[in-house]
Every structure is written in structure tokens, then in C-alpha cells.
Amino acid sequence: AQKITQTQPGMFVQEKEAVTLDCTYDTSDQSYGLFWYKQPSSGEMIFLIYQGSYDEQNATEGRYSLNFQKARKSANLVISASQLGDSAMYFCAMRGGWRSGYSTLTFGKGTMLLVSP
Amino acid sequence: SAVISQKPSRDICQRGTSLTIQCQVDSQVTMMFWYRQQPGQSLTLIATANQGSEATYESGFVIDKFPISRPNLTFSTLTVSNMSPEDSSIYLCSVEMETEAFFGQGTRLTVV
């Protein structure tokens, strides 16, 4: 079984500062993928960044980077230079649990990020 | 990439009624996924819909309550049947590609 753990229910950060959102995972799969999503109050799920289990370099997408530590089974999201618009719920998710021809996503409980001026 | 149009975006329904949610994808995909997000909670997979076959439901979800149709490779519907207030949630459809999973805008359902 797969499990995603996000231990921070809420995080506060000041505008322009960097923030790290924690994510640890557990899986018996050798091949898996890790995702981060942002969910604003509107409810839509916005894809931020992806890291494959065999990727040797940490993924980066603009202000987002993923600190992937495979031995520790952690995939923390780092947001640099926070903006007020970054205030939202953030979900870590893992693709794995391979079945006949497809895999599924397992989500963590999420971290609510609030950015203050 | 994929663009998913999901509707309705929100609805308020009377208990005991049913609501059908539609998802249209701008490209052909083999699998479509339906999730439920209860208030303040994370996303939980309801079922996986493969074109031409019955949907595969996760533990705790049954076809009588959440019937799914998948008539072609770009479209799927999820019906929430005989609704109760406990069904008040955001429902999302999703498709997965190599390194991304795309979601519809979500349907915010309130049952009164």
C-alpha cells in the first residue's frame, strides 16, 4: 500500500521569503512518481511539479523546486520568493500502486499555506 | 497536455435526488479517474473509468451509488445517486499522462 504523509497542517510565511512544505512517502514500488498540487479556494487542482523516482536531479519549475531525498523517502516542495497569490492548500501525491495497465494517485492530507504582506 | 472541461461547477441539490457530473477531455485518453474531496479533506479516488468496460471502484464506493459512464475516449460522467448531506463534497475528474495528472475544475456539491 502507498502512503503520503504531510505533517504540517498549516504554514505561515511572509511575502518574498522562501518556504518548505514537507512530504514523506511510503511505497514498495521501485518505479513511482511524486507530484505537488496547489488548490486555491476555488477548488481547482493546479499542477506544480513532478519528480520521477529515477530522476537524479531535483525537479524545478520556476519558483518551485522539489527537494527529493530518495533514501529518506521525502519529497519536500520549496517555494522561493513567496507571493500573496501562493496562499492555498498544497497537496503532495504519489503515482504508483501499479495495476493492470495503469497506476493511481495517492494524496496526502495537505498543508494550508498563508502568505502575509 | 490535456484540458478537461467539467460541469456543473457547483450545484445545490435536495436530498434523495441525483446529480450527473460531466467531464470532457480535449484529447483521447484510456483512463479517466473520479475523485471525491470531502470538506477539509484530501482527495479520495472513487473509481477508474476505462472506455468500453465497467468502471473499477475503490473500497467504500459502489456502482449503485456512483454509476459511471465512459461512452468514448474523451468523455465520462459520474452520477451521485440518492444524495444525502454526507455527499456534500467537491468531485473532480482527472486524466493522467506521463509526468502530469490533469484535473477538471471540480464540481462543488451541496446537499440540503
Image: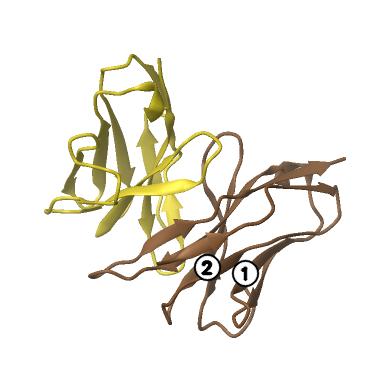
Instruction: Determine the CA span between mark 1 and mark 2.
Output: 7 Å
Give the chain coloured yellow.
B
In this rendering, is residue B19 above or below B90? above
Residue B28: tell me if it is visible: no
Q: What element carries label 2?
A: strand
The structure's colour scheme is by chain
The residue that disc 2 covers is A34
Q: Name the spot of residue A8 as percent of width and height, x first.
A: 69, 53
A55 on left or right of A101: right
Q: In which quarter of the image is the C terminus of chain B?
A: top left
A28 on left or right of B81: right
The residue under the point 45% across, 59% down is A106
The residue that disc 1 covers is A75
Image colour for chain A is brown
Q: Which amino acid does label 2 sit on?
A: Leu
Q: Name the spot of residue B73 as percent of width and height, x first.
A: 21, 53
